Amino acid sequence: MDEQPASADRRARPSGRDAKRAARAARAASSVPYITRAIPIFEVLGEEGLAIIERNADTILEEIGIVFRDDPEALQVWRDAGADVRGESVHFPRGMCRSIVQRSAPREFTQHARNPARSVHIGGRNTVFAPAYGSPFIHNLDEGRRYATIEDFRNFVKLAYMSNALHHSGGTICEPVDLPVNKRHLDMVYSHLKYSDKALMGSVTAPERAADSVEMARLAFGSELTDPLTGRPKTMLISLINVNSPLTYDATMLGALKVYARANQATIVTPFILSGAMSPVTVAGTAAQTLGEALAGMAFAQLINPGAPVVLGSFASSLSMQSGAPTFGTPEPALVLYTMSALARRLGVPFRSGGSLCAAKIPDAQAAFESAQTLLPTCLGGVNFVLHTAGWLEGGLAMGYEKFVMDVDQAGMMHTLLAGVDLSESGQAMDALREVGPGGHFLGCAHTQANFENAFYRSPIADNNSYEQWLAEGSLDLAQRANASWKRQLQEYVPPPLDPAVDEALLDFMRQRKDAFPDSNV
Amino acid sequence: MDEQPASADRRARPSGRDAKRAARAARAASSVPYITRAIPIFEVLGEEGLAIIERNADTILEEIGIVFRDDPEALQVWRDAGADVRGESVHFPRGMCRSIVQRSAPREFTQHARNPARSVHIGGRNTVFAPAYGSPFIHNLDEGRRYATIEDFRNFVKLAYMSNALHHSGGTICEPVDLPVNKRHLDMVYSHLKYSDKALMGSVTAPERAADSVEMARLAFGSELTDPLTGRPKTMLISLINVNSPLTYDATMLGALKVYARANQATIVTPFILSGAMSPVTVAGTAAQTLGEALAGMAFAQLINPGAPVVLGSFASSLSMQSGAPTFGTPEPALVLYTMSALARRLGVPFRSGGSLCAAKIPDAQAAFESAQTLLPTCLGGVNFVLHTAGWLEGGLAMGYEKFVMDVDQAGMMHTLLAGVDLSESGQAMDALREVGPGGHFLGCAHTQANFENAFYRSPIADNNSYEQWLAEGSLDLAQRANASWKRQLQEYVPPPLDPAVDEALLDFMRQRKDAFPDSNV
């Protein structure tokens, strides 16, 4: 009569339940190298709306132009391609960038992992989850917020490696600020290769660091450096090229982009936009600008090396117009995401956006609301490469240990959601309905007994018990349960196999590079 | 380079910011009587899948049948309509229930509020948000969890009245357990009519209590009891008729349904299902059963009074197969929701489902994740009437004060999301892009200055400030900020106008009814 499901029948709980819960959750989250969706992609705009935004992007590229700063080579490339270069400002005939991209950029591509079973396919109906990226701080319940170290970095690589819900090891999961700026990329790339066997991202903070990343990947992959399917160099790295929005590429990012493109490594060309600061305060304006900027960068990569994998990226949040602070999990960025995803599909390139973004400083309800309001649009909108899937706190300033565990749980649920509705005979379950009939109970019926183990997604950290039992177990909140989880996982970590000769080659390379020039924090 | 939006420009914060923030948030959440969506509805199944489920529902109705318990009149109604009645079990020729519903049930209808500006239109592209329903307990940060009282009930009616994001006053928001069971419905209906002017729900715990609800609504609406558009009695109440799943209607619910249908009041016929207990452990099986059960109940209402408004309801959660406890915010119920919503549209009746459901005992990150993973599917899936939009905790056992405030904030965001992308000239914002150009900043441009007030949804409780400022303000989490919010709102509450003669008539009626029989807790 009243809606009180908690009054439903309950069975006695099995003993040793924590162990069983963990084991079952592990089984339930089937270990797939990436998600291939079985449900449709959600669209917010139709043909007419998308065409308006494409037309506006072309107007931006033609009339307003894109600045390629401090990179004469880039300007010459554009001159040779037929663009109108005025100083550092490049103006593109309508449709030029689109046609360059569509001529050679792959619609989908494989990013190889050093463990081939973990290679990911980026594009199409696939979704790849990677951890958060770029935080100088970490946060956990024991220490609060402090600067991140290489030890934290290794911890997150290990946690991402152990998670069935994450498909990728990511890149600068957190900044190891205890290491010099000009050498820490070596330790980061090494940590990914050593403590995980999932695919990884390269450094983008300087062209020579990008080159180091490529070289270390080559050492890890050994002699198999050609993709047998494409005949091109294997794509072993995917790396994040952020645009200096509005409408500007700087020499650092262009330098890294060129290194990766020439080596046939993938780049994610991402206008990084806080609407109201780097773009207009509207969804349609932000989308047109994002598309224009990304088109110029992706086309540039294709001019450098036709066929090099590129991903259209969109990072868009809104400013609080009172305080100037970025906000997350609000509706406008979700609308940008759905719109940009559709534009990427029309263009014919993979799409990166979303994640589990939040402005919250701690893993509280704000963090959860904001993250869910980003991750679910990410998944329904058909994002192919999801940076920031797990750990993000405080607008990206902090990587949270408990937040990581909570986000991984949500990412696990997304596997089930994107698998859609089972319409097999067992999925239709008519036998169960016939067996039980009016007024009966389904717990004991044959169909339930045959299917209950994997019937529903099981969260390893959610508490669904009675109030009394929850009280008896210490009235813990989700963050406290997540705290116990990451500590247990780090204790249980077992590294993936790595050929000792490869390990030694990587260490040799790092030593040699570190000895080649003095430490610097620039 | 790294993704650290928090390093973006920030403006100095205005003083008196709390007051300004509240005022702006109030302005931003435009006060609409209900939402009319401008974005598409998300679908997970195509024609083929939906047809399979419809066929299975027909098989359930024909072969397995529905029990109408302890209600000889109902059995006679079905016999007269041509169904095959065996004992209390009714078997329906294929397509019979569907054709009865489609013959007379309105596709959409208006539920009138005593303030005509707040009447809601249920069905079509509209979404109506109502508070949670049915909790015996309340929860807040000051007192923890305790039994609810009529004072709590009044508080929640006031909070729902003050919220622009909620369109409806709801029904049994919490159980006033300090009042006798057989009379508390009078105080609940009176509280809705007295402390709010939004539309409300009637009692369903006994036919005579349903009749009391109708009578009190008539007193409140005065002489204008006929809908000028339809020529039928005004629909002033919408009430929740839960099916005793699997496949059983009991006399209590049938009694209330008959009272409301005869008075042309709306009923929400809702199979209340925890998959694994009351239905098979699959999405497709649960959907077929839900459709079959709801079809039988809605068809019954049409046989009682052709044209009486009915809503297809679906409440589906999954059992934890370890503990037997219900879980919320998991992917399977979202898939059921999308599926049932599509089936309701195919049938041609309004749809009720979703809300801000959670199993969490407290307003922590679990509560937020689970609620968001229910409310966003609710909105994307096109639910027309959303019970449990705000306040729900602990599987519906507790109504949370802080949870209410948090959920209302999320419901506010859904208004912006469902409004979609502004493609007007101002929405395209090409002037802003031309004015600012490469490397510029949009904060000061004319377009931003003209639009910043209402550019983005503004949460009144989210904290987007710097870590340092957040620390200085006491390191509050979202629940603590929500705690301050509901207390302030209750202090600021001003009741809507109510004709003193109407108030007196309502009080007279209540006195008379309360004096007519002794108190009872049955």
Image: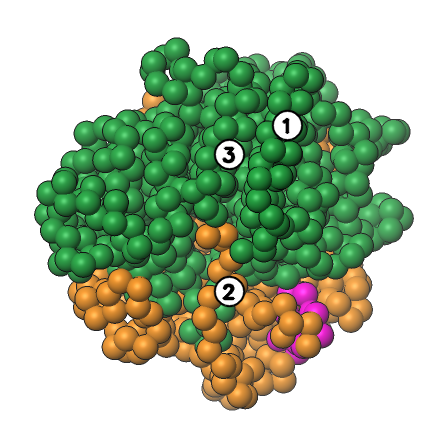
Chain colours: A orange, B green
Q: Residues within 10 Å of mark 3 (few under 14, many from 20)?
A: many
- Cα separation, mark 2 vs mark 1, equals 36 Å
* Rendered image quadrant of residue B331: bottom left
**Residue segment shown in magenta:** A473-487
The reply to whether the magenta stretch includes residue B413 is no
Q: Position of residue A469 (x, y in %)?
A: 63, 74
Distance CA(mark 3)–CA(mark 2): 27 Å
Where in the figure is residue B341, as x and y percent of width and height? 33, 42
Q: Is residue B255 left or right of residue A165?
A: left
Q: Residue at left 62%, top 81%?
A: A488
**Label 1 environment density (alpha carbons within 10 Å; few <14, some 14–19, many ≥20):** few
Q: Amino acid at mark 2?
A: Ser
Mark 3 or 1, closer to the camera: 1
Residue linked to disc 2: A7
The residue to which callout 3 is attached is B213
Q: Hey, what amino acid is under mark 1?
A: Asp
Which chain is disc 1 placed on?
B
